[in-house]
Image: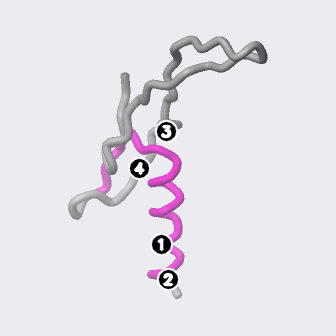
Amino acid sequence: MASCDVCGARRRAGKNVSHSNRHTNRWFLPNIQRATLMHKGKMQRLHVCTRCLRTAQNKRMMASS
């Protein structure tokens, strides 16, 4: 199972809850994408969750202004 190379986000356990309130186990998976980002001074292709991708985009916007 892939995890985020930046924040380490992994799958989390939880429950599906039906209308009749029966509980079954399930996994909540992070939205992992491959992206080319500056990491430790080099451009690298990383597995990144979309939350980290949005944060990186925001930092690029802040640096340019």
- Which numbered tag is attached to residue 36? 4
- Which numbered tag is attached to residue 33? 3
Q: CA distance from mark 2 to mark 4?
A: 18 Å
Residue 9 in the image: x percent, y percent?
37, 40
- The answer to whether mark 3 and mark 2 are in CB contact below 8 A is no
Quick one: label 1, few (<14), some, or many (20+) residues within 10 Å? few
Residue 40 lies, with reference to residue 21, above or below; the image says: below
Q: Residue at x 51, y 28 (%)?
A: 28
Q: CA distance from mark 4 to mark 3?
A: 10 Å
Residue 17 in the image: x percent, y percent?
66, 20
Which callout, 4 or 1, points to the residue nearer the camera? 1
| Residue that carries the numbered disc 2 in the rendered image | 64
User: Residue type at mark 4?
Assistant: Thr
User: Residue type at mark 1?
Assistant: Arg
Secondary structure of the residue carrying numbered label 1 = helix
Q: Which residues are magenta?
A: 43-64
User: Residue type at mark 3?
Assistant: Gln
Secondary structure of the residue carrying numbered label 3 = strand
| Residue that carries the numbered disc 1 in the rendered image | 60
Q: Quadrant of the N terminus?
A: top left
Q: CA distance from mark 4 to mark 1?
A: 13 Å
Secondary structure of the residue carrying numbered label 4 = strand
